[in-house]
Amino acid sequence: MAKANTNRALMFGYRSYVVAFFIFLAAPLVAAGSFAFNDSLFPALPWQGFTLDWFFNDTEPKLGMFHDRRLLRGLYYSFVIALMVSALSVAVGTTNAFLFVRRDFPFKNVFYIMMIVPLVIPGVILGISILVLASNIANSMENRFELELEFLRPGLFLVVMGQFSFITTITSLVITARLRKFDQSLEEAALNLGAGHARVLRTITLPFLRPAMIAAGIVAFLVSFENFNTTLFLVGSESPLTITMYDRMAKVGSTPVLNAVSFFLMVGSGMLALISVAVQRPPRSD
Amino acid sequence: MSADAKRLSLILLFAPFALWISLLIILPHIGMVALSLREKVAPRVYEFGFGNYIDFINEPIYWNTLLRTGSMSLLVTVLALLIGFPVAYYIAKIAGKRSRGALFLMCLIPLWVSDLIRAFGWILLLRETGVVSSVLIWSGMTTEGIEFLYNDVTVVVGLVYTVILFMIVPLVSTLDGMGDDMIEAGYNLGGNTLTVLRRIIIPYAMPGIVAGCIVVFMLTAGSYLTPILLGGKNSSWFTEQIYDQFITRFNWESGAAFGILLLAFTSFVVWLGLRLSGQSLANTVAKT
């Protein structure tokens, strides 16, 4: 009986610890999000009442995020960059999955490790190394052939390349895991029934991979959207949102419009994350 | 398929992989090593040499910053493991079937919010005019606002917060695969909770522990935003030095050398960790 009581007390302690941990997780997010609705010029207590001005108001000093041109431009560039990165990284991730699951070639294990390595290289290093290479090529082209390769200077193209360089590892791992679960006798059956290779790929294998490809695409989109470290070194005049927000924080200090952006991003990425989970979940019937 | 078609399709599948790894990973790093071994002797005149590395050794501020970044990253990794393991175990083994998915999802949600927003949230909570300080004044525990930002404890807490999810996720997925019968067998054979934890659960979870530690350590050592925003001007984080050399001083040669040093240092720690735990990169990080 005494033992059951101590067990119950231990269990209670354990549960409270887990609850405390989740409060710790939520606290800064709640703080970042809720001050978006405080009717005050500073994101701080006391609470001055509810307002949506930080989203929709169109005049200074309370310029809402949907009227703040620079923030909107940042949002637009983030969106464009994230779309390109996720399309590219899902495409290469899919070919990588076929390469490593279906094919045998010399040094396969070495290449597999090389595929994982970008994920453990610090983002700052990826950023500067790509910047150095691109600038070297651009400079030598300019000196030797008087050719100005604008896309190798900091800007959208380099940001996309920098993010693609490590996000592809993530998409490759997600799609590889799914392709490993595929039952190859399905393909053989279709081939026996007279379908060509292209048709089998299109009607059987790719539909099987689709959930993983969508989930990988969403993950890539989100990781790209929130990336800061790699982007910081490669960014040109087209700053994505994280860079714009950081500049604003450094120059103007914290203003509630940043809370409004935070809230907007949290809701947006939360919804995307839920979709990616829902897509990967197998249907109820099995 | 004929042998030729097979070869061709192998080449076609290999091409994107090869382009990606060679153009965006290998060549840039070779370029960075080459740049770091270049000394500026006069304007637009360069010589091969180890000058940038010698500068690093001769300037205590530089290597102190690297050592500080490394040791604080190790501390953050250990704390993340100690704090995260019970939570992961709870999610994987104790929570009921229904709440398990919800809890796991709750763990993941902050993962999709940018570092910047998380650090911003901490700033709003902890600065002198922040929420915690206001609540303390309101409750009468103090009369003046307290500045919780800009010290090492806050930086460590903020970093643990930023990376702990990368510890919990791999731990949950490895612990999830462990059958409850293994734990029961341990108890039936007379082991107490501590023995079961030490002899059964931890060895089983080792790949997850190592994977989490590697990712967390690399993310912490390479992080930029959290130390700068929460630690302020004197956070002395090594990535800040790299940024300073590259962007502020426009000294790319020494910035490249610093980058190589950070990479070498973190890779060494990861290699040591894999060696000591008897794991490999393929069965830890790749699995998560």
Image (tube, rainbow, N blue to C red):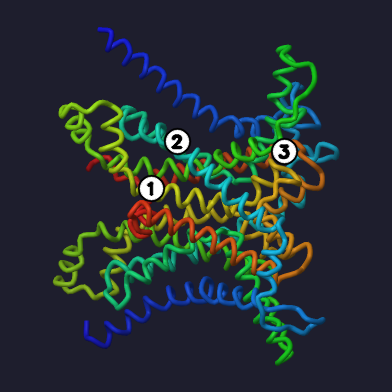
Type of amino acid under label 3: Tyr
Quadrant location of the N terminus of chain A?
top left
Q: Are the residues tagged 2 and 1 within 8 Å (C-beta)?
A: no
Identify the subunit bearing mark 1.
Answer: A
Residue at image location 64% in from the left, 45% down from the top: B226
Categorize mark 2 by other alpha carbons within 10 Å: few (<14), some (14-19), many (20+): few
Identify the subunit bearing mark 3.
Answer: B
Q: Nearer the viewer, mark 2 or mark 1?
A: 2
Type of amino acid under label 2: Leu
Q: Is residue B148 above or below residue A139?
A: above
Looking at this view, name the residue that lies furthest to the right.
A60
Type of amino acid under label 1: Val
Secondary structure under tag 2 reads helix
Secondary structure under tag 1 reads helix
> A236 or B167, which is in the foreground?
B167
Q: Is residue B235 above or below residue B254?
A: above
Quadrant location of the C terminus of chain A?
top left
Residue at image location 55% in from the left, 40% down from the top: B160
Residue at image location 68% in from the left, 76% down from the top: A135
- In the picture, the disc for residue A120 is none
Point out residue A203 in the picture as x, y percentages from the top left corner. Answer: 28, 65
In this rendering, position of residue B26 left or right of residue A99? right
- Residue ID for mark 1: A279
- Residue ID for mark 3: B150
> How far apart are labels 2 and 1 at the CA level?
33 Å
Residue B36, quarter of the rendered image: bottom right
- In the picture, the disc for residue B82 is 2
Q: Do callouts 2 and 3 point to residues on the same chain? A: yes
Q: Is residue A192 above or below residue B148?
A: below
Identify the subunit bearing mark 2.
Answer: B
Q: How many marks?
A: 3
Categorize mark 1 by other alpha carbons within 10 Å: few (<14), some (14-19), many (20+): some
